[in-house]
Amino acid sequence: MKMGCSFLQITGIPNEQDKMWTRISFLIFTFSVLIRDSVLVTGREEVLHISPTVPVVSVGAAVELVCHTQCPNSQPNWEKTIDSAPGKITSYPLKTVLRIDKVLESYENDYKCTTKCRGKFYSKDVYLAVYSFPHNPSVELTSPNPVAGQTVTLRCSGQNLYPCHKVKVYWYRSHELLPDPEEPAVTMNDHLCNTVSHRNYTTTSKDRDLTFTCEIHLGLATAGFQSKNSSVEIHLNTGLYDVWIEPVQTVEHAGRPLSLSCGAGSSNVLTITWRKADSGSMAPSHWNISQGTRYSTLYTEKLEAGDRGVYICEISDGESHTQRQSSVEVWYGPRDVSIEGGGSARESETLVLTCQGDANPEANITWGRREAGGEQLRWNISESRGKSELRIDSLRPNDHGLYECVVENPLGTVRLEARLNVEFPVKPDLEDVILGLCVPLVSLLGIGVLIYLIRKRLFKDLTQGKPSMSEDRSSKVPPSAPTQSTPC
């Protein structure tokens, strides 16, 4: 009632109580106005609202950023801090929408929404985070056929990632995070990047089946988009591991020392033996073998030419067996060099000289002559591995002489010689020919003259009346008796 009475007395002379209530009402009105204005000035969250509040968008996807206000008669709008906003802006009463149909890496930035309310300007920022993570990581075991006690290597890779400056890789064994993660290797490809991480793990005899998981983090604020993972299962074999041989391949000069070593890891006692692939079950007799802890060494103080070949190291621990090979190449100068052919040959015949020898590296074989003469253009030379043949057709007198074969490689030179004698008929002089013809002619002439003289002598005796031998024989025959006729 007193309050009512006091209001009824406003037009009159106010008393002290009325003045007090007037002051209280004014203070309440002023305080309410100040509170309202302070919300507009300092409480910008109450003027502008943006959704989504933390936008994270994959490269190539679409996004809509919506900014709205509850302030009457105001029109919000989008701005980009650096450049004009990409995409399409659609304005409605008390709302504006920025739509980007295909987000690029370059669109990652702060976007600002502004409006004017009751004569004052207000703004609010939102950061658009862009990422690229198209596939789960690829995780694999790079150590084939792992065994208990072996150190295995795991590899994890991610392709076409964004952003790249905050990429992290974490490894888990089963569900346990492995300590001391390595910094992954990152390679850029335009705005995107690829990353690779390796992880070594030493197994134990208790390990049989293991699961390793690789997780890649992009370092984004939104947990749902910051990582992906993949796993690989490993089933360990018991027995040998970390099997090795040194050197795997070597080249050494004959006469020098050489050693080969091989070994392995195992929880059992090892048996290591050596053999040469082309010589049965034993190493050469001039090689020695020494045994160490989980390794063996085969060595020789002086290599021989015949030591080249493949040496096999066989390792066994009673449960499993394996072997490794080492290839040995021995270099040596020419040896077992020989030359065949030469000697005597007749004119127009064919000469064949053969020169050969063993060497490593393979020797170069050349031919030459000590004496001048001959025509090397007529030489036909054919070569095969470690052998050369010199052939000369239709020998001539000036082909005779000393022929030289040179067998040479970087480690030595050997020279061999073969002499050739070409036999040919001697042409007689004209005087010798005439003399040779005259002797038989004179002999024949003498015989003819002698016959002529004998016949002439006989003819003279006949013409002088000397009876001939036939007449003499007829005169000495007695006369025969007269014949009597028989009467008829």
Image (cartoon, rainbow, N blue to C red):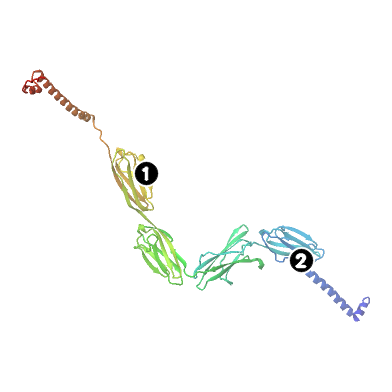
Task: Categorize mark 2 by other alpha carbons within 10 Å: few (<14), some (14-19), many (20+).
Answer: many
Q: Residue furthest top?
A: 464
Check the image and report above or below for 266 versus 1: above
Q: Are marks 1 and 2 in contact (CB under 8 Å)?
A: no
Task: Categorize mark 1 by other alpha carbons within 10 Å: few (<14), some (14-19), many (20+).
Answer: some
Q: Identify the mark at residue 381; answer none if there is no mark.
A: 1
Q: Which one is in front, 309 or 53? A: 309
In which quadrant of the rendered image does the C terminus lie?
A: top left
Q: Identify the mark at residue 48; answer none if there is no mark.
A: 2
Would residue 130 appear left or right of 184 to someone viewing this image?
Answer: right
Check the image and report above or below for 272 versus 417: below
Q: Which one is in front, 383 or 111? A: 383
The quarter holding residue 438 reads: top left
Q: Is residue 404 visible?
A: yes
Q: CA distance from mark 1 to mark 2?
A: 100 Å
Which amino acid, mark 2?
A: Leu
Q: Identify the mark at residue 368; answer none if there is no mark.
A: none
Q: Which one is in front, 10 or 40? A: 40
In which quadrant of the rendered image does the N terminus lie?
A: bottom right
Tell me the element at label 1: strand
Would residue 461 appear left or right of 217 to someone viewing this image?
Answer: left
Q: Earlier in the sequence, mark 1 or mark 2?
A: 2
Which amino acid, mark 1?
A: Ile
The percent position of residue 345, horizontal first and vertical second, equals 29, 41
